[in-house]
Image (cartoon, rainbow, N blue to C red):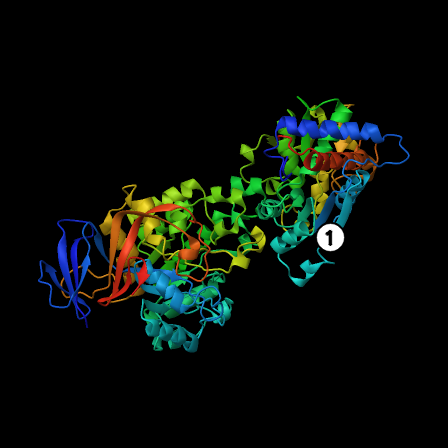
Amino acid sequence: MRHLLTTENLAADTATAVLDTADELKRTLLGREVRKLPTLRGRTVITMFYENSTRTRVSFEIAGKWMSADVVNVSAGGSSVGKGESLRDTALTLSAAGADCVIVRHPASGAAHRLAGWLADTGTCVVNAGDGTHQHPTQALLDAATLRERLGGLAGRRVAIVGDVLHSRVARSNVYLLATLGAEVVLVAPPTLLPPGVEHWPVTVSHELDAELPAVDAVMMLRVQAERMHGGFFPSAREYSIAYGLGEARLRLLPEHAVVLHPGPMLRGMEISSVVADAPRAAITEQVRNGVHVRMAVLYHLLAGEGEQA
Amino acid sequence: MSEILIKGARRYGEGDPVDVLVADGVLAEIGSPAAPEGCEVLDAAGQVLLPGFVDLHTHLREPGREDTETVETGSAAAALGGYTAVFAMANTDPVADNAVIVEHVWRRGREIGLVDVHPVGAVTVGLRGERLAELGTMARSEAGVRMFSDDGHCVADPLIMRRALEYSTALGVVVAQHAEEPRLTVGAQAHEGARAARLGYSGWPASAEESIVARDCILARHAGARLHVCHVSTAGTVDVLSWAKDRGTRVSAEVTPHHLLLTDERLATYDPVNKVNPPLRAEDDAERLRQALADGVVDCVATDHAPHAPQDKDCEWAAARPGMLGLQTALSVVARTMVRTGLLDWRGVARVMSERPAEIAGLPDQGRPLAEGEPANLVLVDPDAEWTVRGPELASIAANTPYEGMRLPAVVTATLLRGRITAREGKIG
């Protein structure tokens, strides 16, 4: 891997190699008192976050630190970005300052692609930590790691992704990665929150959550952002919650073994009830835990696996 | 005034080659005129002679963004592209919503003298869509404004649009609409379709254009006014225009070269050189537009030439300004999409790039027949030559072309404005 920008063209063996490395790292670190590996000593990783984020930024930072990389966090507010510097100049500056890897989150779809283009002549690699409504590949990888762990594998498994697919980079990343890894995906949402051309995606589409739940191995609930409630995408939070929220009654429609995922941050009481979020079959804190290992694996494959073909 | 003998060109690419003597700004003699002493000779063997092109939709950026284009550099690009008249859009800074600005632009065009620069006046004050600009004062100014548009913005309020259309009938001018229902394009970044959705661009739906075109055709018909639709981009708009024209609405429409050739396939690059408003559409839209231009449902080609500074394009997509250069590539794109495909012959090119736009804007001495006594606003085209587009080599200050590195057919070898050579072999004058 030169960069990690999208799951859409990620080969199955590359994705599997990253997931296997994540598993291995998790086993290695399990029960250790000092969670520090020397693997990326001397490497510099810079996170550039142009959107607020707690879990993703912290997860990348910890991943880098556990592998002994020097991690520097740049946020849009506290940098020259606030003075109007262009994304290109910021990227070239960070690369020139010695970044081996730039991890970027940006509200514009394609921002990570642009960055990779501007840094093509440098040795700096780019990890997309979320670009607009396009992709968030490490989220999909950590979801896959969690599902593999819970379900024993992904081939032939059926995953429902529920909610605001239209605006969700998590949904896009998961749709392609899950399809690549052999899972079936069903998208469940009102027509207003489904993207145009979804019939060309490797998915099936449904507007009826209750009809889908009995046949799935996992259900992934997407956050409904507050601004959608005022955008006319659905009549009210109450109606949305009734039709597409995951409460206790719906939980009973799921097969015994089925897993509940949520990329966070959750809106308890909206797309997911508090009881469901804390139920044993919810893997939400495991997702966060696996996120660190998956991001360690990604950094490993980008920075330590030089010369490796992907 | 010096005399020029054009030797061996075929008018409209038809019939036998003829020699054309240009004198006193007109086509003095056609056939085998003797070369007067000291007359300049243009060897045009194998070339096509056409009336000079007329662009109803150009952004010359003066006043306000002279770092990207000026009347002078834009005029040079126009002459090199085969144009003898261009209409400069009103979205300058300050906005061309009053006689002072339109007269400034008009006068700059005259001083430079490479192409007739006709300022377009704004329909509403500051392009804000709230109250009518002084259309009459601009029409009666020295600039003699013939066309009004808030281009870049839609005159979205139906009442304001109705009033503008009604008021325009007394002035004999045309209102050109940038058809985009703004409520349907909040935050829009790219053509709403499968590609944009997959790549995470928020969508600019075809319905935002089609609903305004339909509304305006209805308003124009009731007002008895003339409406011109800027940069038609969707197959559905072609249907609406066809319907409106069938029932006698006085509506005309333009299509840009980029909507004839390029599609939203370009979105995968995330390179904002492909960002334009209205956005590049799907293949079936482009195909329909080419057919509509051939059929006459869409009247003419207009460039929407839109220079932008490097920093406004070399950035993330959402932050980039929409628009692309067009004056020097228009003919070649039309040759590739319309002539090489057999949809138009060169007489058809004269119709869509010169005669119809001149008619729509009411220019009496442009888009005229290639006949003795007619004004010598001419372009010579080598139909068999090809060239490779290089943004920095274009005459515009800006270099934002989506055709960078592309090999295109047909080369403008000379442009004449009222009998004077304004461009020749890729050079000015």
The 10 Å Cα crowd at callout 1, few under 14, some 14 to 19, many 20 or more, is some
- The foreground one among A124 and B353 is A124
Q: Residue at x 73, y 52 (%)?
A: A74
Displayed quadrant of residue A240: top right
On-image quarter of the N terminus of chain A: top right
- Residue B283 in the image, given as x and y percentages of width and height: 42, 41
Residue A150: x percent and y percent?
77, 26
Q: What is the number of callouts on the image? A: 1
The reply to whether residue A211 is in sight is no
Q: As rendered, which of B262 and A254 lies closer to the eye?
A: B262
Specify the subunit that label 1 lies on. Answer: A
The residue type indicated by label 1 comes to Val
Q: Which residue is at 28% across, 45% downward?
A: B339
Locate residue B281, reporting x and y percent.
Answer: 45, 45
Image position of B202 (left or right of B28): right
**Visible residue check, residue A227:** yes
Residue B278's x, y, as percent? 47, 53
- Nearer-the-camera pick, B366 or A61: A61
* Residue, disc 1: A74
**Residue nearest the viewer, comparing A198 with A6:** A6
Is residue A285 shown left or right of residue B173? right
SS label for mark 1: strand
Q: Which residue is found at the position 9% from the left and 61% from the top?
A: B33
- When asked about the image quadrant of residue B147, the answer is bottom left
**In the image, is B427 to the left or to the right of B17?**
right
